[in-house]
């Protein structure tokens, strides 16, 4: 394979950053439209319609698959290879939440902007940006707005696309709104699930309140915290949220959402087994009924720090003055790496209060973020063309 | 119901979706040699002004060349309205700086009439600054009838107006001054104008030639005044209205609506109403408006007498 002419891409990245501000309104308008279109997991149809309109307007062939994901193709000069750019369409916000976006001088404010309206806006803006910057790729560019990614969606949209696409994907970039500098080329092993505890309705006064579902859940959590978590491979048990009760009476039900993440797949399996043992022990020793449901699973994968496209992305970031923040992913990247597709996840801008009501993103760094995506695309394209 | 209203509703009431083809609309505008200005009158609208400019500029200037200029005419905001509008590329003017010889009266009507002098378009589309769900249809849906049909002069918006609450929106309400004051007033004195579904909507597109011939009260009553004057001079057939679906906006307190209602049935306290002739008499460097050919403002006296009758 020819060596990568890195300086060419580094210079191009800087040029794009200088030219992109002229296209600011086009991008920000897409960000506003994407941010103001509610798109909770399994209910992404309205946002898909917006993407359909934009792709059709831009003359791109596009289609919606059985999972509701939308893909469009920007044909390459040779069209022999295919590069996928993907962004998940779903957000953590229900439709009833106010999705109004507000623009101040330096920021956009609104729920779901960073995760992932901005990523979707970049996806849908990309054909126009490439046209205006005069960027032609050898490979076909497949743009995918993936449904059903978050939570119980479990990457269903992306997995379905990868399993059924007739255009084999040679490399991929996943877009996330935040944070600029994010560079993910590996993914963690992960399980995500819920533990639910139910105590009998009739109160046993001899237990003096210890029969509450909260007390039983507390026992379970205490035992979970006792599970060994090695430093190598790095392993985490994340207790994400807990819900129980509504007042001052002992609740009958309690729910705990959790994730187990590890660089080692064996560790995830071991901890899952220990969790199952804890549930069995609680069920055996008390009248409470505990259940565990695992609804999302990832296998660990790693493209490698020195892989050509990782090195290219690092170099491009550094040329833009963006400090690469290497972090493993548990999102779309895992479905791609699991299929042996060289892939990266890149962040687009700086954001605050991500996944909170006060979420906001900075406008100015977006130009660095978009420039890095476009230059990295070119680097990948060059690499594929010379393989 | 007047015999005219039913056919007018059939022929002059549109839905914005009829004008979905912005490319075609922009081409026709180009063919006809028209220019279009968007004017956003503001007073402390920092929460919404930035997004309005982003959307209108991107969709109707960059993507489809329908609009030639977008300007904010500000009454002296004390928040960051002017800075934000400027940062997103709008032309921003303090209305007190326009025609300073005519004085400065803070008010919406003041902004609107000074905009005629400041802006260059053959069609001026006014858009209120407090629209939370701004969309290109708020402009394209209003200028399109004027582009397609030369006989139309004044296109008014109508829509559902859910009220924004702390969490989410409520699907009813809004338009209270319209229902309690203006529609009964029209029903009594100008029955045909009841065909206008939302006569007080802040979004409308008007031909410059019309704006130059009607007076502008400085306050909230400007829209009611316009409608009466245009009706008297050109008749109901000069109007059209477009359904823009939903407009989400900041809810006004009853006190604020009281001021609006007062303004709607009042004339300026100084008794002076700016007209095209007073604008024309100004010598104002840098303005292209002074070089335009304008018809005399003959409607002024009759409009005043009509409004006097209406108040009895």
Image (spheres, helix red, strand yellow):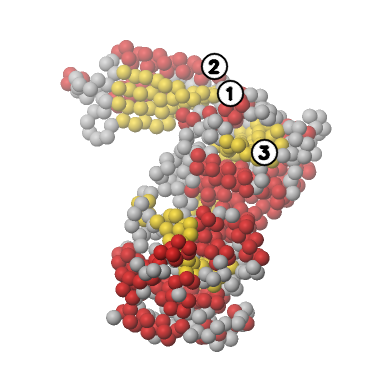
| Residue A187 image point, x, y percent | 58, 28
Q: Of helix, strand and loop, which one carries label 1?
A: loop
Q: Which numbered circle lies on residue B156?
A: none
Task: State whether residue B123 appears in this view.
Answer: yes
Chain at numbered mark 3: A
Chain at numbered mark 1: A
Q: Which numbered circle lies on residue A300?
A: 1
Residue at 71% in and 37% down = A140
Taking the view exactly as shown, the residue that stands out farthest to the top is: A284
Instruction: List the residue tagged with mark 2.
Output: A266
Give yes or no for contact between labels 2 and 1 (Cβ–Cβ under 8 Å): no
Q: CA distance from mark 1 to mark 3?
A: 30 Å
Chain at numbered mark 2: A
Specify whether disc 2 shares its chain with disc 3: yes
State the count of labels: 3
Q: How busy is the neighbourhood of tag 1: few (under 14 within 10 Å), some, or many (20 plus)?
A: many
Q: Image quadrant for the N terminus of chain A?
A: top right
Task: State whether residue B199 appears in this view.
Answer: no
Residue at 39% in and 69% down = B3
Q: Is residue B309 above or below residue A196?
A: below
Q: Is residue B8 left or right of residue A48?
A: left
Q: Of helix, strand and loop, which one carries label 3?
A: strand
Instruction: List the residue tagged with mark 3.
Output: A73
Q: Earlier in the sequence, mark 1 or mark 3?
A: 3
For the residues carrying marks 2 and 3, which lies nearer the camera in this image?
3
Taking the view exactly as shown, the residue that stands out farthest to the right is: A2
Taking the view exactly as shown, the residue that stands out farthest to the front is: B3
Residue nearest the viewer, comparing B115 with A176: B115
Taking the view exactly as shown, the residue that stands out farthest to the bottom is: B281
């Amino acid at each position: 394979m020819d060596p990568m002419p890195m300086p060419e891409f580094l210079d191009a990245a800087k040029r794009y950053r200088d030219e992109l501000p002229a296209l600011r309104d086009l991008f920000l308008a897409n960000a506003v439209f994407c941010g103001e279109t509610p798109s909770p997991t399994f209910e992404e149809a309205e946002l898909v319609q917006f993407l359909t309109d934009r792709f059709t307007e831009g003359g791109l062939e596009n289609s919606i698959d059985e999972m509701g994901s939308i893909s469009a193709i920007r044909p390459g000069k040779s069209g022999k290879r295919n590069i996928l750019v993907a962004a998940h369409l779903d957000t953590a916000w229900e439709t009833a939440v106010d999705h109004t976006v507000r623009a101040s001088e330096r920021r956009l404010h609104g729920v779901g902007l960073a995760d992932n309206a901005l990523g979707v806006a970049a996806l849908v803006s990309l054909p126009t940006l490439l046209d205006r910057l005069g960027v032609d790729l050898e490979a076909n560019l497949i743009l995918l707005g993936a449904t059903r990614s978050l939570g119980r969606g479990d990457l269903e949209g992306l997995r379905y696309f990868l399993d059924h696409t007739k255009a084999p994907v040679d490399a991929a970039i996943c877009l996330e709104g935040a944070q600029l500098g994010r560079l993910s080329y590996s993914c963690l092993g992960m399980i995500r699930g819920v533990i639910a505890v139910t105590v009998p309705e009739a109160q046993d006064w001899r237990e003096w309140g210890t029969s509450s579902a909260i007390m039983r859940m507390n026992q379970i959590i205490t035992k979970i915290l006792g599970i060994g978590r090695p430093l190598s491979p790095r392993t985490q048990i994340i207790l994400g949220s807990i819900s129980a009760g509504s007042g001052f009476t002992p609740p009958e039900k309690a729910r705990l959402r959790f994730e187990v993440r590890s660089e080692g797949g064996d560790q995830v399996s071991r901890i899952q087994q220990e969790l199952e043992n804890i549930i069995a022990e609680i069920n055996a020793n008390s009248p409470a009924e505990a259940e565990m449901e695992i609804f999302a699973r990832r296998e660990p994968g790693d493209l490698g720090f020195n892989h050509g496209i990782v090195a290219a992305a690092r170099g491009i970031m550094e040329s833009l003055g963006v400090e690469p923040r290497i972090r493993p992913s548990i999102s779309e990247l895992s479905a791609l790496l699991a299929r042996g597709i060289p892939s990266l996840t890149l962040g687009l801008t700086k954001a605050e209060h991500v996944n909170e009501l006060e979420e906001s993103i900075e406008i100015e760094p977006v130009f660095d973020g978009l420039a890095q995506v476009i230059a990295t695309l070119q680097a990948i394209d060059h690499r594929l063309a010379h393989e | 119901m007047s015999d005219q209203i039913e056919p007018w509703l059939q022929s002059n009431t549109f839905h914005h979706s009829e004008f979905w083809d912005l490319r075609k609309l922009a081409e026709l505008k180009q063919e006809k040699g028209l220019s279009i200005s968007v004017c956003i009158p503001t007073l402390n609208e920092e929460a919404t002004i930035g997004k309005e400019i982003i959307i209108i500029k991107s969709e109707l200037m960059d993507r489809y060349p329908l609009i030639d200029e977008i300007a904010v005419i500000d009454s002296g905001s004390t928040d960051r309205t002017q800075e934000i509008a400027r940062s997103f590329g709008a032309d921003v003017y303090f209305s007190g700086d326009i025609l300073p010889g005519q004085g400065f009266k803070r008010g919406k009507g003041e902004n609107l009439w000074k905009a005629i002098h400041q802006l260059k378009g053959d069609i001026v589309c006014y858009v209120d600054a407090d629209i939370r769900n701004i969309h290109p249809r708020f402009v394209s849906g209003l200028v399109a009838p004027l582009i397609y049909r030369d006989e139309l002069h004044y296109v008014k918006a109508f829509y559902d107006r859910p009220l924004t609450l702390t969490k989410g929106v409520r699907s009813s309400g809004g338009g209270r001054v319209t229902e309690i004051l203006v529609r009964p007033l029209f029903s009594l004195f100008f029955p045909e104008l009841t065909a206008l579904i939302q006569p007080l909507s802040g979004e409308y597109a008007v031909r410059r030639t019309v704006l130059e011939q009607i007076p502008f009260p400085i306050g909230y009553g400007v829209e009611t005044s316009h409608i009466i004057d245009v009706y008297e001079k050109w008749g109901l057939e000069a109007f059209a209205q477009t359904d823009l679906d939903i407009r989400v906006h900041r809810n006004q307190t009853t006190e604020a609506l009281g001021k609006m209602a007062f303004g709607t049935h009042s004339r300026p306290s100084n008794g002076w109403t700016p007209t095209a002739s007073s604008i024309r008499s100004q010598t104002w460097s840098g303005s292209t408006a002074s070089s335009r050919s304008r018809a005399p403002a003959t409607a002024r006296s009759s409009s005043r007498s009509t409004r006097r009758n209406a108040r009895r």
